[in-house]
Amino acid sequence: MMERTENRPAATRRGAWRLAGLLAGVLAVTQLQGCFVLGAAAVGTTAYVATDRRTAGSIVEDNTIGLKADNQIASALGPDANVRAVSYNQQVLLVGQVPNDADKQRAEQIVRGIPNVKAVLNEIDIGPLADLNRSATDTLITTKVRARLIDAHDIFGNAFKVTTSNSVVYLMGIVTQREADRAVQIARDTTGVSKVVTMFNIISEQQLQEMGNPQVQNAPPNEPRGNNPA
């Protein structure tokens, strides 16, 4: 399929942002404490899939939704927009930047039209595209939050999907209220985080037990926190 000429600058920028993000991620891992590095290194792609609380079919569907959303939004909005769609359990988070509200709403409409999308959280910013420094900082924050979630022994770090945009951390996952509260606390206490927004599927402790998750055996009792603490 031929690439549209007018979209090449945007594709080039996205490639540069990915490279900056990768370099930031590598730097973050090398600067974290030894226990963090060990935890991150031990979690490979195969292990992550094996411990993901979504079904295999749901994981595939999320990947399909993300690809469709990214491609359709880029085609519709062109090089002046930088939007990323993150799908977890068929719930889609939209982050990035667009020049006006019409483009923000257009991106959401596109995603809502994709088959099997259950919900959309539109967190796109209206303004100039993020530069490489901003992208690298966001990736560094994501890396630190993920590492701290993995290092925590009272929750299961791989149950959470972490996304950062403009220093705002978005947490997604199939988790108990206890796990949700703890993850929000961890993210809030991470250097550089300005705000935490959640998009969870809350399950009961009994449902978690039935999943055979070993972390629940040593979990502390629920703390008296409100719903959706972010």
Image: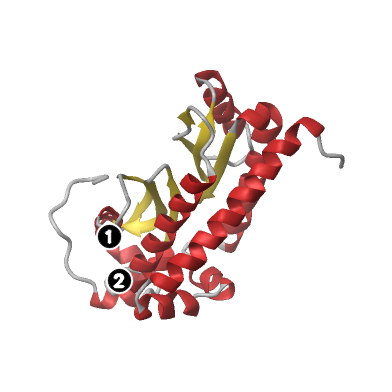
Is 158 placed above or below 215 here?
above
For the residue labelled by badge 2, is the local secondary structure a helix, a strand or a loop? Answer: loop
Q: Is residue 130 left or right of residue 6?
A: left
- Foreground: 73 or 7? 7
- The percent position of residue 199, horizontal first and vertical second, equals 39, 46
- Foreground: 182 or 90? 182
The mark found on residue 217 in the picture is: none
Find disc 2 in the rendering and name its residue.
Answer: 152
From mark 2 to mark 1, how far is it between C-alphas?
A: 9 Å
The answer to the question of whether label 2 and label 1 lie on touching residues, with beta carbons closer than 8 A, is: yes
Q: Residue flagged by tag 1: what amino acid is it?
A: Ile
Residue 4, by quadrant, is top right
Q: Residue flagged by tag 2: what amino acid is it?
A: Ala
Q: Is residue 128 left or right of residue 141?
A: right
- The percent position of residue 125, horizontal first and vertical second, equals 46, 31
The quarter of the image holding the N terminus is top right
Find disc 1 in the rendering and name its residue.
Answer: 186
Task: Give the total number of marks visible in the rendering.
Answer: 2
Tell me what residue is drawn at x 68 percent, y 29 percent. Answer: 78
Can you see residue 199?
A: no
The quarter of the image holding the C terminus is top left
Residue furthest right in the image: 2
Q: How crowded is mark 1: few (under 14 residues within 10 Å), some or many (20 or more)?
A: some
Can you see residue 147?
A: yes
Tell me what residue is drawn at x 40 percent, y 71 percent. Answer: 31
Q: Residues within 10 Å of mark 2 (few under 14, many from 20)?
A: some
